Amino acid sequence: MKTSFSLIICILLSLAGSRAVAQDPSFYIFLAFGQSNMEGHARFEPEDTVMTNDRFRVLSAVDCTDPDRKKGVWYIAKPPLCRCDTGLTPTDYFGRTLTERLPDSIRIGVINVSVGGCKIELFDKDHYTSYVSSAPDWLKSMVQEYGGNPYERLVEMAKIAQKQGVIKGILLHQGESDTGDISWPEKVKTVYANLLDDLSLKAGEIPLLAGELVGEAQGGKCASMNTVIRTLPETIPTAYIISSEGCEAVDDGLHFSAAGYRVLGQRYGEKMYALLSSE
């Protein structure tokens, strides 16, 4: 009798502990990766640092001193959302759009692991080593901020997030460094499939939102790649393309301005809201 009572107590304590770390189905997590436009090229402006919402959070993928953040810890989402010295990204207004549209009971969390100037190969866990070995020193330096393996850092952070919430989608903005590569959709599919497998996710439940590059009308130097990007849904049925039409760009023809990121991020958010609403 005494043994049975002790066993019951142990079971109850175990269940209580499980509930303490259980996923919150109302905490929606989104993974973001890519190159400089997802990293955030434009400096954020005063309007981007006000009206923050504690329902919108960012899981820091790196340690920072300014702002003061620790890797693997959640913070109220206030730019920069990628690394310590990056700028405004599409994830900023993606999250703000969702928190505005979704019920107050829903929280939004983003994880942004991006490296300016990288090819999609950087996120291919089977080929990133050879890619990085021949990369310029400035790119290697950014890669080192993620422990030398950005893909693995993204997975590491995603697993931390899965203990508290539910991954609902993946955001991608990449392609400038792969302009003209018609095999890009297949390479993205490899990364997407690896993420699903490593995080025990189902493709039908995890849409991939891929943004267009600076368009021709905005003087985009890599605008021709948008034709390739638009074919992604033919390779990944759960992929959706986010238009960059009319998004303001800066003079280099490669990056969006802060105003452009706000519009692009809102479009990512509106599309994800539509997909969530159709569930």
Image: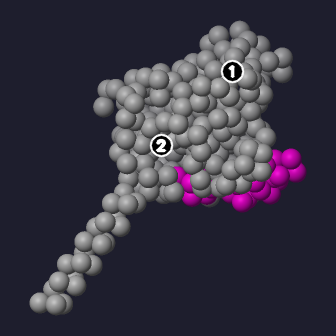
Q: Is residue 173 above or below residue 167?
A: above
Report the residue that reaches farthest toward the bottom: 2
Looking at the rendering, the stretch of residues picked out in magenta corresponds to: 133-158
Residue 118 versus residue 164: which sits nearer the camera? 164
The image quadrant where one finds the N terminus is bottom left
- Which of discs 2 and 1 lies nearer the camera? The answer is 1
Q: Picture coordinates of residue 73 (x, y %)?
A: 59, 53
> Is residue 53 within the magenta segment?
no
Indicate whether 53 appears above or below 191.
above
Residue at the spot 68% in from the left edge and 34% down from the top edge: 79
Which label sits on residue 29?
Answer: 2
Q: Is residue 209 above or below residue 224?
A: below
Provide residue 217's location: percent of width, then percent of height: 71, 9
Q: Which mark is residue 47?
A: 1
Q: Secondary structure at mark 1?
A: helix
Q: CA distance from mark 2 to mark 1?
A: 25 Å
